[in-house]
């Protein structure tokens, strides 16, 4: 497997990663410094400065953007249910955003997968009163030291309070605030711990990092992800949603079936282009030089995953 190192990100991409497109030069030196230390500290530093945007969706469901992955929120008298917990450095701003929605306490947290930008806040959300539910592999990876080669980073075990206490292997159902919530395992996709979270009555689904809306996705081969798994997960998402479904991606703006379809077609086309070049015997650097993503770069290649990095991620799996 070819390790794809994301340490060398341009400052522009970092700011995009943090949702700081309108950033001024005020914090640029810090960001440039952070860039030297790798993607994980960089994401944390970006989250520490990012504003938390609250977007109401449908039927007491909202999304918070600005701290790692998108955070879904269901409000109601029975307590708030959160999907993913962002970075701990955003705690005060996430708590303020949650308070702005309602005064209900947080009682439930669901993790879409184990990655730090979706689970780092688990400990404080748990201490605030939430029971944590996730796929069993999320518990497994958070419980032990886990390396992500693509980030050149080894995560220590998470603190006890951050570990999910309700886990499942295929399917799980939660009932909260007169809302039925269906959790379903994708099988190996972006990692080996990804689940979808469907609010049945509202027809709103959080698909975690199986969808990066508008950006080439990261794929974590170190914990079971692959390009073919990503494509399979996207095909399943397309069978679940209709033109009316509101889709919360792991990263990027809230989207719909048309956007998800375009993403699927991009993944398949690039997979096929890269596979053809690899079959011809081309090395990774020769494959990158052949620009198999060229037709898609202006739309999808402007975030964390550059065309070259994404080509490497696909090359590893074909
Ligand atoms: Zn992820």
Image (tube, helix red, strand yellow):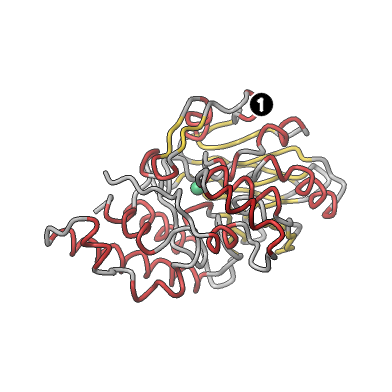
- Where's residue 291, x and y in %? 28, 69
Q: Name the residue under label 1.
A: 161
Q: Which residue lies at the image location 62% right of the left edge and 41% below the top edge? A: 110
Residue 129 relative to residue 259: left or right = right
Quarter the N terminus occupies: top left
Relative height, residue 317 to residue 55 (above, below)? above
Please identify the quadrant where the C terminus is shown.
Answer: bottom left
| In front of the other: 158 or 49 | 49
Task: Count how many numbered circles sit on residues in the image.
Answer: 1
Please name the residue shown 84% across and 49% down the image. Answer: 99
Density class for disc 1 (Cα within 10 Å; few <14, some 14-19, many ≥20) is some
In the rendered image of this protein, does residue 166 appear above or below residue 194? above
Give me the residue at 48% from left, 55% from top: 9
Residue at 38% from the left image edge and 64% from the top image edge: 307
Which image quadrant for residue 22? Answer: bottom right
Which quarter of the figure has residue 245?
bottom right
Camera-nearest residue between 239 and 293: 293
């Amino acid at each position: 497997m070819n390790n794809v190192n994301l340490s060398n990100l341009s400052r522009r991409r970092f700011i995009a990663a943090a949702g700081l497109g309108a950033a001024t030069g005020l914090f640029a030196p810090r960001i440039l410094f952070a860039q030297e230390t790798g993607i994980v500290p960089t994401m944390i530093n970006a989250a520490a400065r990012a504003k938390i945007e609250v977007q109401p969706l449908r039927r007491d469901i909202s999304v918070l953007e600005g701290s790692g992955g998108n955070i879904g929120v269901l409000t109601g008298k029975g307590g708030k249910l959160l999907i993913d917990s962002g970075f701990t450095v955003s705690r005060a701003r996430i708590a303020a955003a949650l308070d702005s929605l309602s005064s209900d306490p947080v009682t439930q947290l669901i993790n879409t997968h184990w990655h730090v930008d979706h689970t780092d806040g688990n400990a404080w959300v748990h201490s605030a009163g939430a029971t944590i539910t996730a796929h069993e592999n999320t518990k497994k990876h958070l419980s032990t030291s886990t390396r992500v080669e693509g980030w050149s980073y080894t995560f220590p075990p998470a603190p006890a309070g951050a570990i999910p206490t309700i886990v499942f292997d295929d399917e799980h159902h939660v009932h909260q605030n007169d809302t039925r919530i269906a959790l379903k395992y994708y099988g190996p996709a972006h990692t080996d711990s990804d689940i979808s979270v469907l609010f049945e009555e509202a027809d709103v689904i959080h698909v975690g990092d199986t969808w990066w809306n508008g950006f080439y996705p990261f794929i974590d081969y170190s914990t079971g992800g692959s390009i073919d798994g990503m494509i399979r997960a996207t095909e399943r998402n397309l069978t679940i949603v209709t033109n009316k479904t509101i889709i919360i991606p792991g990263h990027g703006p809230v989207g719909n079936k048309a956007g998800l379809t375009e993403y699927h077609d991009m993944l398949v086309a690039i997979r096929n282009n890269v596979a053809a070049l690899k079959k011809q015997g081309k090395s990774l650097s020769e494959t990158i030089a052949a620009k198999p993503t060229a037709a898609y770069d202006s739309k999808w290649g402007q975030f964390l995953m550059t065309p070259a990095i994404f080509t490497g991620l696909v090359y590893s799996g074909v």
